[in-house]
Image (cartoon, rainbow, N blue to C red):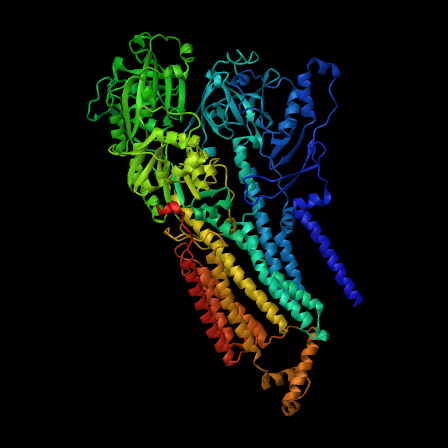
Amino acid sequence: LGLKGLGYSVLVDFAVCALILLLQFWLVNVYSWAQLDSERDPTKAEVVLVKPLHVQNAKYYKCFVQKNTSSSSNSSKAKSNLKSNLEEEEERDAIWFEFWNARYVYERSSGRFLRLTYPVEGTPFSDHLKVSGYGSQKKVEKALDKWGTNEFTFYKPEFLPLLIEHMLAPFFIFQLFCVGLWCLDEYWYYSLFTLVMLVLFESTVAKQRLRNLDTLQQMGHKPQTIWTNRDGKWINISEQLLLPGDIISISSESGFYETFVPADCLLLAGTGITNESILTGESAPQWKVAIKFRNPKDTFSWKKDKQHVLFRGTTLIQHETDTCSHLSPHLRGRKTPNGGMLCEVLRTGFSTTQGDLMRTILHSTERMSANSSEAGLFILFLLNFAVAASGYVLYHGIYLTDPGKRDFFKLALNCVMIITSVIPPELPMELSLAVNTSMLSLFKKFIFCTEPFRIPFAGKVDACCFDKTGTLTSTRLKFEGVGDPCGFSDLGSAVSDLEMPLSPQSDAIKVLVGCHSLVAVDGKLRGDPMEKAAFKALSWTITKDNMAKPRKSNTMITGKDRFMLKIVKRFHFNPVLKRMSTIAKVEPMEVSLGEGGPMSGFIVLTKGAPESLKGCFAKTPRNYDEVYMSYARRGLRVIALGIKRMKSVTDMSVARTIPRAQAEVELDFCGFAVFSCPLKASSSETLLSLRQACHRLVMITGDAMLTACHVAQEVHIADKTPLILDEKKGRPFLQDRLSFSDVESVFEWISHDGSTDIAFNVDSVAELAKDYTLCVPGKAVNLLTKAGSEALQCVLPYCSVFARTSPDDKEVIVKTLKDVGHTVLMCGDGTNDVGALKSAHVGIALLNSKPIKFKKPKKKKNKNLGEWIKELEEEEDDTLPVVSLGDASIASPFTSRFSTVTPCLDIVKQGRSTLVTYVQMFKILGINCLSSAYSMSVMYLNGVKVGDTQATISGIIIAFLFMFLSNSSPHEKLSSKRPHSKVFCKYFIVSMIGQFLLHFLFLYGSYQYSLTFQVDEDLERQICLRAGVVSQSQCDATTLSDVLREAQRLAQGIAESKVDFQPTLVNTVAFLVNFMVQLSTFAVNYVGEPFNASIWKNRGLIYGLLACSLLSGLLISGVDEDINATFEIVSLPKEMKLLLSVGGITTWLLCMALERAARLMFPEKIHKNLLI
């Protein structure tokens, strides 16, 4: 006993020490408490604890502090330039750490660690015009040490260390602990099976993660060489050696197949056209202009000045060079060696926009699972029941058991096993499997997700917001013509008929073909679909040197009337001003006319929203508003056109210096360009399905209000009479901080046709929403923002159409819907909607790619061995792949390769399916664990246990059933009912506890009834004969009391000698009842329609349940002794067979009725705004 007690003591001490070490490995806070001392001064610290924000279930990470120390500079140099040396000293003594591929440097002035970024945001443009690059090799080496190389390098572990890291996770260690307990209780097969299953799962996860890291390392383009100005010379270096502050020259004629932008760069001189689809998904080329004509006092903003920035990874399609006279003396007057654009490198490596996207993808390749905090609370909830059962067993073993028969080791072992039984070893695997299955299902539909934890959010969505242009409506616009193309006649009271401007004297033609952002690539026009539609209808084109001229097929402009337009300067579209302008030069195509001909000269061409451009005209027609509003009511897109001839300007250099404010005034009205924008084929059907499924539909667009209202009616967003919030005429637009009354004094409600006026009152908006579809302009959103969040929450959640909104307005609308409790889905493109897409719970960016053609299955043919092996390898790779850069967007966590809104329906349905599967898994695991805890306690009190073979076979069957359960597919039709989104809700608690009580009655009744049966005489004789205690004749003459005494002695001997497991009636009943309970929980708690496909369509699950039900029937009937021997059970008495059969079916029916009743009595709550 002394040695045995000493052994137990050593084992306990070892376990405690191991637990302390593991806690330090798992929890950084424990490690810091045990190993480190707290230090407030970062200059003396060695380790910092980092917790990332905006990450689900974020934990603390340990990062080691790095310090740059070197000898101080010469004192004489310090005196000559004190400020410079102070800055250098601060850099030498820098304190920093690296976390998730980013460096964070301690800022002494603020006392905080800030991410190391090149100082660009908020800097005046004059600073960038003075840059000259790195002047010496010493500065280059110093900068390289500070900023690092311009490449995506990250740590990739080996398989074995990564597997060990996964196997040291808390759940895996707990599972190993459970395996050890089962081994102590002599469950060898079950322990081996569980251990193999756990190691295989972790090996698969580790292997998949390594494959993802391999794929990430191969992403991006191959490094190219780039011309860089260093030490006053142009040198050709690898782009991996670029540093922030470098001056580089980029040319579209670099000699490579494609010219990729090597870093995030600011364009100093020249003009370029880039393809940014790899970042935003938007296929339209983007114009990039230099900062040459910006006011030097203006400050740079990443958000507002994207037209000056070339982003890493994007493709340079075309470029134009320009003089460098506006730059520093070091660069002034010098030509670039390759005739490229002059740029300043701003960000490199992981600091770039593409690098941020890469970091998001990189850190999403780690283990993906559902809400772990809810899982922890659920385990604590079950733990209460297990502690109660274990406490009763402990009490019974200490106080109600004969002291001579006590076995404290067995008692302690069983108590611990009862407690650990409530934490199922398959829990982390099942939760990860549910999320991964959903990811793979979306991937097969060409929907890509970089943040897997958002998939269950899609199942909770109750408000769906959509952009209009390019999202709900097609990008293939049709140019219908120009209203009042002459521009000087009175429009009159009647609406003008649309005419196609074909006359060479038409100013409307000049605006439509001269004010654009199109570019010719390989002989094809690329850019804004609206502008392409106008060029096609007018039969104009763009040459290689970006000159707009009529096509040869244009028969309306001939001879001396033929002219060309060359854009001298562009004022790109501004979402706040809602217009764009160009300064163009008109040149005759007849050489004999010369530049002084009647068709030559400089002109300002402007187009934009009619209400925005109205104040820019020198004179507007009398019925200006009525005409464009009449077009808009018909769902047409209306653009106002304006022109101004600059007769005093004759020099191109002078024209390029004209500021925007001077160009966009005193314009002559040229008419209204009208475009029809048809709906996409699936828009109306998809949004109708969402509305019927009780979702709030919202349109957020930059288009005109009346056009938006017309489209909203067609796609079922506006199901009532539209009521528009309009600015009162004559009321000034207030700019300062406003109150409710100030806002109410500026706006009023008017009907769609202008016949009804209703005073605007913030408190009455909810009542109006019951009878009208409320429509709000972006100007009102801006004003309500100044009145505070309360004003926004009183108005915006009840409105369905938002028009003339800026990107900032879209973000405010989405955030307000979130603030009032909505789970918001936002669908749009990857450019103007970035803020709103990132703010939404579920952001979906449409990549606007070409329709994907599916390959037809090839006919079967005879294959050789090599082909078979190759096919098997391809099938082996059918796992969840990592999202690539071309498939992900910087705009949102979800991206779709299709340009229609159908993926919104797929994501919502998959989200509901995942959410339902997630909740039902918890319920099944909970009921099974509670039943198992009770069974273990009862069996221990009765001196019996489950057989090793029984536990192994049962574990295998349950694992397969869970796998089939997680493969459930979403229901084809979206239902108006909502899935329960939380584990801790009335429905879940009532259903789970109620089912457990029913199973408990079945378990308790079966156990108690089995104890009433005495061992019959035949069984006693078999025991005697097998043990060799008596012969056949002696056994026949032995009295019943003698046999019982002999059986008792044999049982005691078996227990003492620890022979193999021997089945008993109580053990058999315990196994069969628990097996039936587990099958019942799967069959009852599977949630099929209306969220998942019916259980009859889940072939794996239904076939598994039917096979297991047949197996349980065979085991109860005992018709096959071989099956009984395999499962280590004994034959049951007839009464017991009848009880188990009737009790099992009755319990299943009662649980089914309880589950259905709980769903009906406690449905998921619907947001109050959806009831309006």
Q: Is residue 712 above or below residue 969?
A: above
In-front residue for pair 748/492: 748
Which of the 4 image quarters holds residue 714?
top left
Q: Measuring from the top left, give residue 1015's x and y in whole percent.
A: 59, 82
Q: Measuring from the top left, give residue 805's x and y in whole percent.
A: 38, 31
In-front residue for pair 887/559: 887
Q: Measuring from the top left, give residue 484's x and y in whole percent.
A: 23, 22
Q: Is residue 747 above or below residue 542?
A: below
Residue that lies at the very extreme toward the right in this rendered image: 2
Q: Is residue 569 above or below residue 1151?
A: above
Q: Give the number of callouts.
A: 0
Q: Residue at x 73, y 19 (%)?
A: 73
Q: Is residue 385 left or right of residue 694?
A: right
Figure quadrant of the N terminus? bottom right
Q: Is any atom of residue 219 visible in this view?
A: no
Q: Is any atom of residue 375 visible in this view?
A: yes
Q: Is residue 141 above or below residue 875?
A: above
Which of the 4 image quarters holds residue 750?
top left
Figure quadrant of the C terminus? top left
Q: Is residue 1020 left or right of residue 545?
A: right
Q: Residue at x 62, y 85 (%)?
A: 1021
